[in-house]
């Protein structure tokens, strides 16, 4: 599984970057002159729905002398330690890129399965992003409770007899104590 393609529930402050292959006919509905909308984008990511208000399409040529990694660092406040390993890959992008912010997933967990024309360039955390949620592998557990041990079996009538005996001894002790005081 590629890191960044699994979106945890309640994720905040992560930007996923995809390069768009203009030659892929499946992407025609999200390429210029069409606006990017969730109805066309969701199936291209393998999802039922996605919010389009938190998706940006950027033409690399519109950046002028600015590199894509610089746009992410300055314009989106992405952490330098996240950008550094991917800087060369980001700056080599041409054509159009999509920036998909965490809010586009509506707080729901998702597993992205991008169409062949969407090339994943990386997932990057903003400076103000909360720490990534801790995910632990589920611990194996028995679904059925084991039978109680033989020594824990109910005592039946013998248990009641012992309770009555202790109650009788208690009452006898109270009577003796009252007789000695009087």
Image: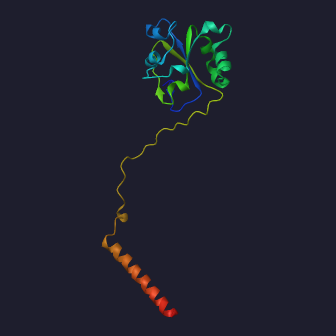
Query: Between residues 156 and 58, which one lies in front from this camera angle?
Result: 58
User: Left or right: where does residue 96 sit relative to residue 115?
Assistant: right
Residue 96 placement (x, y as % from top left): 56, 10
Residue 75 placement (x, y as % from top left): 66, 18
Q: Residue at x 38, y 76 (%)?
A: 163
Q: Residue at x 40, y 79 (%)?
A: 167
Residue 170 placement (x, y as % from top left): 44, 82
- Up-down relation of residue 168 to residue 25 (above or below): below
Q: Residue at x 58, y 23 (%)?
A: 15
Query: Between residues 100 and 116, which one lies in front from this camera angle?
Result: 100
Residue 138 placement (x, y as % from top left): 46, 40
User: Left or right: where does residue 163 sit relative to residue 23?
Assistant: left
- Up-down relation of residue 135 to residue 67 (above or below): below
Furthest residue to the left?
Answer: 157
**Residue 133 location, quadrant:** top right
**Residue 93 location, quadrant:** top right
User: Left or right: where does residue 31 sit relative to residue 128?
Assistant: left
């Amino acid at each position: 599984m590629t890191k960044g393609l699994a979106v945890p529930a309640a994720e905040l402050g992560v930007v996923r970057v995809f390069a768009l292959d203009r030659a892929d006919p499946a992407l025609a509905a999200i390429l210029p002159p069409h606006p990017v909308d969730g109805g066309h984008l969701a199936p291209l990511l393998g999802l039922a729905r996605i919010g389009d208000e938190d998706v940006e399409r950027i033409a690399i040529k519109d950046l002028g002398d600015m590199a894509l990694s610089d746009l992410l660092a300055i314009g989106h406040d992405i952490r330098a330690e996240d950008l550094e390993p991917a800087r060369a890959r980001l700056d080599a992008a041409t054509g159009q890129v999509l920036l998909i912010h965490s809010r586009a997933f509506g707080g729901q967990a998702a597993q992205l399965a991008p169409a062949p024309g969407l090339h994943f360039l990386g997932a990057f955390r903003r400076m103000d992003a909360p720490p990534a949620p801790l995910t632990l592998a589920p611990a194996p557990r028995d679904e059925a409770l084991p039978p109680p041990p033989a020594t824990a079996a109910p005592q039946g009538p013998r248990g009641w007899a012992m309770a009555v005996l202790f109650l009788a001894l208690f009452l006898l002790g109270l009577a003796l104590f009252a007789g000695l005081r009087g």
